[in-house]
Amino acid sequence: MSTTAAEVGRATPTGAITAADLEKDRSFKGTIGDITSPNARMVCRDVNVYYGDKQAIKRVSLDIGKNEVVSMIGPSGCGKSTFLRCLNRMNDTIPGCRVTGLIALDGVDVYDKKLDVVPLRAQVGMVFQKPNPFPKSIYENVAYGPRIHGLTNNKTELDELVETSLRKAGLWEEVKDRLDQPGTGLSGGQQQRLCIARTIAVSPEVILMDEPCSALDPIATAKIEELIDELRENYSIAIVTHSMQQAARVSQRTAYFHLGDLVEVGETDQIFTNPQHKLTEDYITGRFG
Amino acid sequence: MQSTLLIVLLGIIALAYHFGRKRAVAVAGGPTQIKTLHSLPTYYGLYAALWAGLPALLLLGFWAGFQETVVTAMVKAQLPAEMTAGLSPGRLGLLVNDIRNLATGNIVSSEVTPEIQAAADNYLRLQGIASIALWALVLAVAAGGISLAWRSMAPQLRARNRVESTIMVILVVFSSIAILTTLGIVLSVVFESILFFRSVPLTEFFFGTHWSPQIALRADQVGAAGAFGAVPLFTGTLLISFIAMLIAVPIGLMSAIYLSEYAPRRVRSLAKPALEILAGIPTVVYGFFAALTVAPFVRDLGASLGLDVSSESALAAGFVMGIMIIPFVSSLSDDVINAVPQSMRDGSYALGATQSETVRRVIIPAALPGIVGGVLLAVSRAIGETMIVVMAAGMAANLTWNPIESVTTVTVQIVTLLTGDQEFDSPKTLAAFALGLTLFVVTLTLNIIALHIVRKYREQYE
């Protein structure tokens, strides 16, 4: 099962890494585990991210597969959010941020100079840490994406799209009688589901979630987690989380980041029950983080 | 004389501070025992200084305010009866003035008689007594304060609390001075306006369409009866403000959007202060720019198009006023646009919106209440603006919406009514106060609405 990074073309030390080696040296020697996915949607190879002179992500390679939830865990400042924001080029808006390496969506280089970010971001949607509904009505929040991309031809189609998006986000029953009220008036959990509905409305292929539950209470969190599980049927999902329980509950694969390095990737069960790298084990068992 | 006393008093205060501090340390039982004091020694020093200075300063201020009046009244009372007999109050005032001028060595209007000389000597004598009394009293009060503070020095004395509550009282007094002054100004305008509306009915002022305030000041003077229909002034003000906003809102808003959303940091750091320089230009400079550069240009341009443009057109004044207001609109809009959280922009970009779509559909709607508030503040500034219109808009109270004609504004009329000869029981002069009151009410209302909108909007994102 354990595939070293070298097998996917990385210039890192090869050979099986034994537990004894790790005991001797806890430092990072290359990603452990299978970074590939059989049904890869997004393929990332040797991704480096620099903020000015500082390197935030160091040669990270990871695939995100179809109908799969990949969770990214790690201590604060380990670069997991930075990596996530590379996937739909949200880092473009940060001055001084530079990305190298390959990131491809369905075989198309996302960082190709000729590529327009507008359709990319429609294909790779994003849900943020803090719910950020626009100061518009619930309906307008969901209709925003379809409107700017011209996805519907008339009002009826738009109404239908808004309804299906809200249904998929599990919010329809709660808001169907007050679609014209401001989205900012909803509760935190409802706002976050509204943001998910807004993302779904432009029918993306991949949904990126940056700690989507960190501002929510446990009940709202449970609803979102349930929703993530349902969304897996139609979308690829990459989720950054600080909660290891959440990663264990919602994801099929887990990636552990440490100081800009992708330390270990694997099946979620295996990462949480039998981590290979000492750093991963320390983090999961709560020795630091 | 009184200034010397003031300096002496300040010296006493400094000494009281120094010795109060020392005394506190001594009371505590030496520098090692400072912990036993309720407050830091500094506060005991301040406490002593306040006791020494505050009552004495109050007395000094009070005395300085009333000494002149009291002494003058006494001199007046002691004048020989034959001198004051049959004098009108006005003449008596002149006489007293002469006495005072003689005493202080100024030019005297009439011949110096022995009686007047005697009165002046009396005046000087009384002044001397008064200032000696003042010295004695002030120093006594200061000494009394110090001894009070000295005796109450004890480790249990809550010097810090006392000092801080005294400071609070001082702050309250000073802020009430500011508020009461405003109130005083408003009341004086209101009372003069009431006088005006006694002679000119409200309906004529607010609905009359003819403004011609020329009125005979003296009985033998030839003059018009005066007409006080202020509607042409209101329309003139509105017309010029409207033209100004037509210039300022688009330019200000566009530059705010560019600076806050598109401009690189370097451009922003240069362009924003440059734009705000506009706000630092004195309005009188704008005024002659309007009168000497823009107005002739507009007239010549009109002439070349075959239009008969007045050389003091509403267009020129409004245009320059608009330029003056640009920094208001742009910096207020810039603030509210920056207050829109980054997460809104992220949310929009993440849905694949372009920058202009984000600005148009998310940022501007989110910032709109704040922008409206900023524009209203700018409008109230435009309505109250005086110098530009005095120099460029003209005096003719034409009731017109035509921007190339000459109009006049409320502020211009106030200026013309209150310059030159005036008589405070004539409606001509009092009309200025009525106009001022109207202006005040309008701008106050606009400001309250604008501030309310801006504040409500700010809360939304905090």
Image: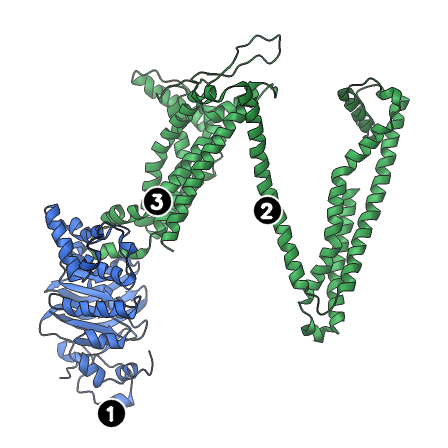
Chain colours: A blue, B green
The amino acid on which the numbered mark 1 sits, given as a three-letter code, is: Ala
The amino acid on which the numbered mark 3 sits, given as a three-letter code, is: Pro
The amino acid on which the numbered mark 2 sits, given as a three-letter code, is: Ser
Measured Cα–Cα span from mark 1 to mark 2: 75 Å
Which disc number belongs to residue B175? 2
- Name the residue carrying label 3: B369
Horizontal and vertical percent position of residue B377: 42, 39
Q: Considering depth in this image, is B56 or A107 the residue closer to the camera?
A: B56
Mark 3, secondary structure of its residue: helix
Quadrant, the N terminus of chain A:
bottom left
Query: Same subunit under labels 2 and 3?
Result: yes
Mark 1, secondary structure of its residue: helix
Chain for disc number 2:
B
Label 1, residues with CA under 10 Å away: few <14, some 14-19, many ≥20? few
Q: Is residue A128 above or below residue B420?
A: below
Mark 2, secondary structure of its residue: helix
Residue B221 is at least partly visible in this image: yes
Horizontal and vertical percent position of residue A220: 26, 67
- Name the residue carrying label 1: A20
Chain for disc number 1:
A
Residue A220 shown left or right of residue A237 in the figure: right
Q: Residue at x 18, y 74 (%)?
A: A251
Quarter-of-image position of residue A44: bottom left
Quadrant, the C terminus of chain A:
bottom left
Q: Is residue B115 above or below residue B44?
A: above
Residue A110 is at least partly visible in this image: no
